[in-house]
Image (cartoon, helix red, strand yellow):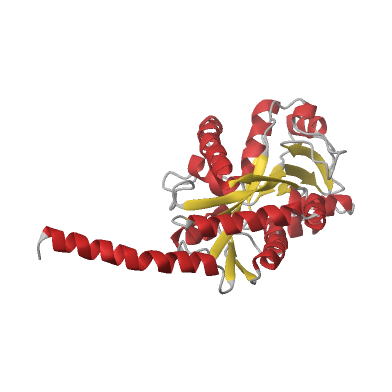
Amino acid sequence: MNFRTITLSLLALASAMAPAHAEDAADYPSRKIRMLLPYAAGGGGDVIGRLLADGMGKRLGQTIFIENRTGAAGTIGTQQVAAAAGDGYTITIGGMTTHVLAPAVYPSLPYDPIKDFTTIGRIGTSSILLVATNDFAASDVAGLTKMAKSGTPIQYGTWGVGSTGQFCGEILSQQAGIRLEHVPFNGIAKIANDLLGGHIKLAMLDMATATPLVQGGKLKALAACGERSPSLPGVASYKDQGIAFERSLAWAMYAPAGLAEPVARKLSDALKQALADPEIAQKLLALGVTASFLSGDQQRDINARDIEAWKKVAKEAGIEVK
């Protein structure tokens, strides 16, 4: 077979395949969509995912079902999404830990947070909350600093080494000149349960998990690592309390790489429409998340920029997953 014959055969094959892809995109979604969440059931990320699965499913005219895969501060489930087919039938939501901080602390992360994903869009911004049991002696950063400097050993829980929670703890420790002992848990829901049971007194929680517990008087909040949240306006931020840290921490939606542009656009439009729904936006706010959609391209560029900035923080704090 000569070169011309091969070339014509390949062109014919490509021509035959093109309408099929177009038809697939036009018919999408023709079956159920899996939202694989790297968070334990009942945790903040899980609650956000279920809320959006319902809202987006109605707009796409198809069921979005939840599958939870936890472990390694969310990186196990996130890796499984990266390895899935880029056909629009597997999606996930990710926070700072899975898509920005993981590459800063894992020497050999099993996925590339930029290249291995199609970013669907930003869901909104949030903070990490430093919370304590109601009988904890301190109620703010000044009180916690005083306790630590008096020689009182203080442990704080997070959902894993290299998590956003640990970064927030290390930033506080460095700038306040104190030592806090990090205790990693397997999932945010486990930390919340142990706080409520009195097994640990201090922890970092995502706003989605912490907000209802603080509003319900079950825990008290000492500070917001990030922006002061409109859902808990009485809780002072790190910056308000003399800790030089003020960043927007974002939740975003992702699919595996290679997603056809028309399919990505349908998912992005469904997310944008869901976030514009006042009922959904209010429910997110009750979880400490301020709905603020950004396109996938915009959020991907922000992630790429922030990864490099957080690598510097990780190096200074000595945070590394070995």
Q: Residue 312: percent from the left, percent from the top? A: 52, 30
* Farthest bottom residue in view: 31
Quarter of the rendering occupied by the N terminus: bottom left
Q: In which quarter of the image is residue 61?
A: bottom right
134 left or right, relative to 257: right
61 shown above or below 162: below
Q: Residue 27: percent from the left, percent from the top? A: 54, 70
Q: Which of 23 and 119 is in front in this view?
A: 23
Q: Which residue is drawn at 85% across and 50% down?
A: 214
Q: Quadrant of residue 33?
A: bottom right
Q: Residue 2: percent from the left, percent from the top? A: 9, 62
- The image shows a total of numbered marks equal to 0
Q: Nearer the viewer, residue 11 or 173?
A: 11
Task: Tell me if I can see residue 195 in this picture.
Answer: yes
60 left or right, relative to 263: right
53 left or right, relative to 5: right
Q: Which residue is drawn at 49% across and 52% down?
A: 117
